[in-house]
Image (tube, helix red, strand yellow):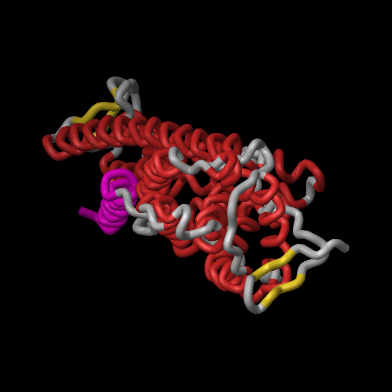
């Protein structure tokens, strides 16, 4: 083997290892080339979208499909170039056309390599030695295997995307389209009756767990951004985390202990944080130094607005604004790191409008003061 052929074989092994880690091993952040390639394409799409002004959300919504096409092309090109490096030294000797002379340039090698990798297998060039016949056989097996793997991978990605969108839409509908966790909690327990709430939240917890694992198995999902903020991972994660925080810090625990201490509430809280942490760890999220946190004051004003919603729904409460602010301060930074990466503002994620005035009682908790 020549140095050129060794380089070609190494390049093919590199791309096959990347395909193996991305599709078969299926863990976020484990690909050799794919994570960097996807980030590069995202950066290019985001850069183009940045100059479009108000049309930026529309442009960003094409990022996911563009990355899919670019990734398939990237893998195909890498394997073809690798095969061409192996084939070129054999042109004119071990590999010849059925008639006429044999060009030995690299473009011809690319053509022969593409034909040998293709399941169609068309072309005038054919192998004439045992080594080149084995090479063509291996190329055809690699091409057919990679094609079937990529097709099944894309089917799974889009299936997981549909399930993620279904979860996001369900959460939004349960808030009455407001995106406010307090509205969702009020609808879960109309008149203070939370008898079915644990069952409903259990269904959400199962869907959320599948969505979390889908992002772990298919990292490509992260780059699918929709124009409607309700489909944002950051938004439905924020709503669910805010919901569980309100349940823990607002409901009358002795009266609603079956919900407050239920497994579905804890599962939602833990799974939503795991989902955000997975995205924050494996993707280029916003640097924490550039974040402008809301602060405990704004958290408490938001809490007062939530209390107004719950009390108007005749739900008994034992408010604790300090504990709410402390818990929200633990998970909201994750949302603020993940959301802006896909072009969502915090006002599109946190849809509750804080009350203008609030007073904090050291004995009872939060009291609403007429402004």
Determine the image quadrant of residue 105: top left
Q: Is residue 188 left or right of residue 177?
A: left
Residue 313 is situated, as x and y percent measured from the top left of the image, at 65, 44
User: Where the C terminus falls, by quadrant?
Assistant: bottom right
* Magenta stretch holds residue 93: no
Q: Who's the residue at 64% across and 70% down the image?
A: 365
On the question of residue 8 being in view, the answer is no
Give the answer, above or below, for where 272 lies relative to 77. below
Measuring 20% from the left and 53% from the top, which residue is drawn there?
1
Q: Which residues are magenta?
A: 1-25
**Whole-percent x and y of residue 230?**
63, 41
Eyeballing the image, is 342 above or below 196? below
Q: Is residue 4 magenta?
A: yes
Q: Residue furthest bottom?
A: 362
Can residue 36 be seen in this snapshot?
A: yes
Q: Foreground residue, 201 or 119?
A: 201
């Amino acid at each position: 083997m020549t140095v050129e052929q060794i380089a070609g074989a190494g390049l093919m092994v590199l791309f096959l290892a990347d395909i193996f880690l991305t599709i078969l091993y299926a863990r976020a952040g484990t690909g050799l080339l794919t994570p960097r390639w996807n980030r590069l394409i995202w950066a290019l799409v985001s850069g183009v979208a940045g100059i479009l002004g108000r049309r930026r959300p529309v442009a960003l919504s094409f990022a996911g499909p563009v990355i899919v096409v670019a990734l398939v092309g990237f893998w195909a090109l890498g394997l073809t170039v690798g095969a061409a490096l192996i084939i070129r030294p054999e042109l004119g000797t071990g590999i010849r056309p059925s008639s006429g002379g044999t060009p030995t340039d690299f473009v011809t090698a690319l053509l022969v390599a593409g034909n040998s990798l293709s399941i169609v297998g068309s072309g005038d060039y054919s192998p004439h030695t045992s080594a080149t016949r084995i090479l063509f056989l291996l190329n055809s097996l690699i091409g057919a295997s990679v094609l079937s793997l990529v097709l099944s991978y894309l089917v799974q990605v889009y299936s997981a995307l549909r399930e993620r969108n279904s979860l996001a839409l369900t959460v939004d509908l349960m808030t009455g389209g407001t995106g406010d966790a307090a509205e969702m909690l009020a609808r879960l327990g109309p008149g203070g009756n939370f008898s079915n709430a644990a069952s409903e939240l259990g269904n959400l917890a199962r869907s959320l767990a599948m969505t979390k694992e889908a992002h772990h198995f298919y990292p490509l999902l992260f780059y699918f951004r929709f124009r409607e903020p309700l489909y944002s991972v950051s938004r439905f994660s924020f709503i669910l985390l805010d919901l569980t925080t309100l349940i823990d810090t607002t409901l009358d625990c002795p009266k609603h202990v079956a919900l407050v201490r239920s497994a579905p509430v804890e599962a939602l809280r833990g799974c939503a944080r795991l989902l955000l942490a997975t995205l924050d760890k494996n993707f280029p999220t916003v640097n924490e130094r550039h974040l402008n946190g809301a602060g405990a004051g704004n958290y408490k004003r938001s809490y007062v607005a939530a209390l107004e919603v719950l009390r108007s729904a005749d739900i008994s409460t034992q408010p604790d604004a300090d504990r709410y602010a402390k818990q929200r301060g633990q998970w909201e930074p994750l949302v603020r790191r993940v959301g802006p990466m896909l072009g969502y503002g915090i006002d599109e994620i946190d849809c509750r409008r804080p009350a203008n005035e609030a007073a904090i009682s050291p004995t009872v908790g939060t009291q609403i003061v007429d402004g």
